[in-house]
Amino acid sequence: MKTFKLIPFLLLLLTVAMPASAQKKTQKTYIPWNNGKLMVSEEGRYLKHENGTPFFWLGETGWLLPQRLNRDEAEYYLEQCKQRGYNVIQVQTLNNVPSINAYGQYSMTDGYNFKNINRPGVYGYWDHMDYIIRTAARKGIYIGMVCIWGSPVSRGEMTVDQAKAYGKFLAERYKDEPNIIWFIGGDIRGDVKTAEWEALATSIKAIDKNHLMTFHPRGRTTSSTWFNAAPWLDFNMFQSGHRRYGQRFGDGDYPIEENTEEDNWRFVERSMGTNPMKPVIDGEPIYEEIPHGLHDENELRWKDYDVRRYAYWSVFAGSFGHTYGNNSIMQFLKPGVGGAYGAKEPWYDALNNPGFNQMKYLKNLMLTFPFFERVPDQSIIAGTNGERYDRAIATRGKDYLMVYNYTGRPMKVDFSKISGARKNAWWYTTKDGKLEYIGEFDNGIHNFQHDSGYSSGNDHILIVVDSSKDYVNKEWDELPDAQQRWEKK
């Protein structure tokens, strides 16, 4: 990601304020860490809180939030994320060395010496970072802190000793904040500057025992390649990247098979096959309204149906959550601030993009059913599965199963993979969360195709439940707020 000159900009919130009717629905704030700190669940696939409450990660890539937004803008952005169900915002704590924010304040003025970083009467860079973290906390949102982006480190702008000093500073400043998740790396391979990344990670972990940590890798790579056995790595992260099938762009050491660029489910399967098995997530998939392949702004743009496909493919393959991205939002494009990758739309207008507003349906769906027993199971798809966009992907618990179908192609589904002699079935529409009861079925293999027919982006989910279970009601036309069922009284 490029770094640009930052120009303060006053966002007129009244022009984009939510109507009063919408505000009434959002008065209650769910604070996840009231259930205890985040930890890896016993089966090694998911995250949970200390009291057993599941945590489904619904992330948003607010990369340049600390550098580009002032206090009012940051509060507004975080509130909008909360309204759409996002519970993790991924940010670049430092996007450069030094970094500069909307108030013209530098992240450091004397190398990696942080002794005099707090200046009386000055609202400094780290004061603003504090404000962002605590504002997010009031809204029940975690901050995924990429400590420093990979590009300055690859240029030699952080040595091992500086990494130790920086890690000590970060851990001492934020170890008691409830809503921190540490990201080592930042769009970089783990075999580049490995000693620096190890030093940063271990220096933080030596002080902060309460927060989870991962590594954010380069596009089309996964942290499990380099750090799966590292004691500081709590869960794996991969970046499936922005390329479409067949886009190589002259890559030499290509990290994945030719013509599998969009198959982010492959990264999940590989990570889950490592020993020890650790939870995994796609921390940077394609972004809504970013060009295919990223760098040519004349290319086609990824749309809402594409970001949905990446989300459901990854989660149904076994990811413990998913992170969404948007071209304008991730760089907080606005008048007076230049943008990259052909972005034209101001970030506050991009909050209305359909994909940004559809991710909440994934989170609610996954929290509706028993959480920790769920596993990927492609044997649910009977007969021959499709390839690429036609590939159906299945997941199940003991008494429920779900199949994601991106194109609406006919498919055969084996109901015997879950308990019960009789099964109820529904269609779930990913773009609006609508439910449609299909009927009751006996065991065996059944043929399904949604009435809307075959078309790329015409994605639906087939939900099948043991008829003796009441996870879903036949009369419902949408799922109720599933988060409520997990709240501990």
Image (cartoon, grey):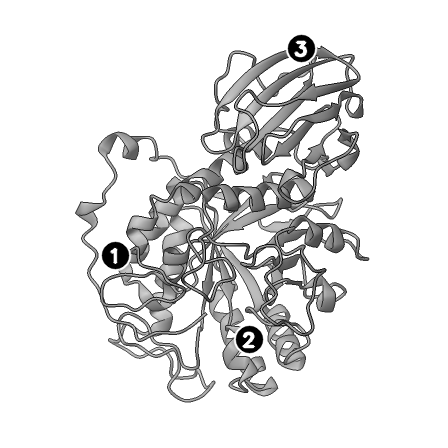
Q: Secondary structure at mark 3?
A: strand
Callout 1, which amino acid?
A: Asp
Q: CA distance from mark 1 to mark 2?
A: 29 Å
Instruction: First in sequence, mark 1 or 2: give its number.
Output: 1
Instruction: First in sequence, mark 2 or 3: give its number.
Output: 2
Q: Residue at x 62, y 42 (%)?
A: 389
Q: Nearer the viewer, residue 383 or 41?
A: 383
Residue 53 quadrant: top right
Q: Which residue is mark 1?
A: 72
Q: Is residue 246 left or right of residue 298?
A: right
Callout 3, which amino acid?
A: Glu
Q: Residue at x 62, y 26 (%)?
A: 462
Image height check: is 271 above or below 444? below
Image height check: is 21 above or below 5? above
| Pointers 1 and 2 in contact (C-beta within 8 Å) | no
**Residue count near mark 3 (Cα–Cα under 10 Å), binned few <14, some 14–19, many ≥20:** some
Q: Which residue is mark 3?
A: 440
**Residue count near mark 2 (Cα–Cα under 10 Å), binned few <14, some 14–19, many ≥20:** many
Q: Position of residue 57 (x, y in %)?
A: 55, 46
Residue 448 in sight:
yes
Q: CA distance from mark 3 to mark 1?
A: 52 Å
Q: Which residue is mark 2?
A: 167
Q: Residue at x 34, y 76 (%)?
A: 100
